[in-house]
Amino acid sequence: MKSLYIGLMSGTSMDGIDAGLFEIKERTCTTNATLSTEYPPELRTALLRASRNPGTCDVDELGLLDNWVGECFMQAADDLLARNGIEKTLVRAIGSHGQTIRHQPRSKRPFTLQIGDPNVVAAGTGITTVADFRRRDMALGGEGAPLATAFHKWFLSNPKENRVVLNIGGIANITVLPAGEGTVFGFDTGPGNTLLDAWIQSRQGRKYDSNGDWGASGRISEELLAALLDDPYFRSPPPKSTGFEYFNLEWLQQAVSRISKFESVWDEDVQATLADLTARSIAEAIGKHAANTGRILVCGGGVLNTALMRRLKEQLPGVVVESTSGHGIDPRWVEAATFAWLAKRCLDREPGNLPAVTGASRETLLGGVYYGLDAASGKD
Ligand SMILES: Nc1ncnc2c1ncn2[C@@H]1O[C@H](COP(=O)(O)OP(=O)(O)O)[C@@H](O)[C@H]1O
Ligand SMILES: [Mg+2]
């Protein structure tokens, strides 16, 4: 049986496509090769507009973006193999998350939409592609997110230690991994990098605050922080998931405008406050729902925000806070590995969701299968 899998992922930050080649066996996952590619700027702009202002995106545009993102994902997989001299026939499957354009788990008709046509990926690479991982869980009443939790449990849990895996992408999510027999659960704690990115983009035209340096030059506004933390999302009980539909520039601007009437808040102060908002909301969620945590393993692009990591450690005294890198996987590649692993689970007919995490009524297979060139021969 082939044991090589490709994971393709682009998160809500839309900072680019992460493509990873992983060797996954019964108990091990090894990262063999990785590649990050950026979207063409025109495509990124169109994706940001379509997702942040959905009213401006019509059916024709959505179809076009679906095809274009599919082509970029296909190219990322192709380049990953070509640059590392890996034969396509050695790869059992691609797990392609696609690009989330909309995630509305709590609307009257819940839905989530990831684009990047998997037919384009499967036809272009010739490799069996598993995609559309979230909607089966949602069809069973779940949030369709977070999905990385099952992978965290499989790869990063330890029977002797209460752990939390913290992913700081656009949104931050935690997976609580109790030692022993306790129930694994997880949820989105709120904004990760999304507000930090949106604010620096709107004020300075930069994609993100490198190392968190700009924010570190500002002063935290306790009033603004309190106003932001007062949002009911932070108080609502899990399971819960969220996205940029909720935590966005408008959401921030309302509070900033209110506070600015009483206090002068500079742009860098807002950035400093946002970093603290991310750190505090994470620390409070862990304090409330995983009070006996001994170690927090952090992954996602937020690990590279040094100032944010420092604030997080300050908020969590007595807990070891470290990146996943010492635990077998580079923090930037956990999500790509998750979808490679979920592709394997699907082909092995194993469930991919954890109902205690997503709120689904039961365990289920996740993903639709788009067969590659070997399909006619009956091999995966
Ligand atoms: N050097 C860095 N300094 C500060 N922040 C960074 C750095 N590199 C990446 N990031 C942050 O990580 C984000 C991307 O993280 P990622 O885990 O890929 O999120 P997503 O899953 O939403 O795509 C960027 O948008 C940025 O905010
Ligand atoms: Mg990303």
Image: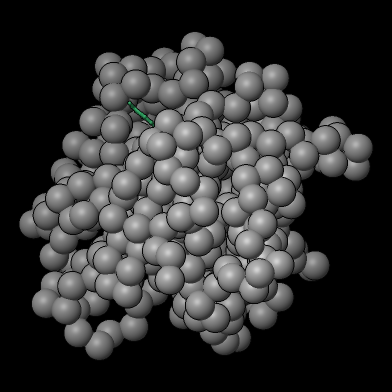
Q: Nearer the viewer, residue 250 or 60?
A: 60
Please identify the quarter of the rendering in which residue 286 is found. Answer: bottom left
Rendering coords of residue 326 (x, y %): 15, 50
Which residue lies at the image location 28% right of the left edge and 85% below the top edge?
A: 182
Across and down, in percent, residue 149 comes to 41, 66
Rendering quarter of residue 59? top right
Q: State whether residue 350 is above or below residue 4.
A: below
The C terminus, quarter of image: bottom right
Vertical comparison of 294 with 217: above or below: below
Of the pair 372 and 52, the residue shown nearer to us: 372
User: At 53% across and 26% down in the image, what residue appears?
Assistant: 38
Which residue is depicted at the point 64% across and 73% down?
A: 378
Residue 283, can we see it?
Answer: no
> Quarter containing ligand 1?
top left
Q: Position of residue 259 (x, y in %)?
A: 49, 29
- Judge by depth and name the residue closer to the eye, 42 or 343: 343
Q: Relative to 11, does residue 38 appear above or below in the rendering?
A: above
Position of residue 171 in the picture relative to residue 110 (left or right): left
378 left or right of 24?
A: right
* Left or right position of 338 against 89: left
Residue at 30% of width from left, 31% of height from top?
305
Residue 154 point in image, percent of width and height: 32, 71
Number of callouts:
0
Quarter where residue 23 is shown: bottom left
Instruction: In the displayed orientation, state which residue is furthest to the top.
Output: 204
* Residue 108 visible in the shown view: yes
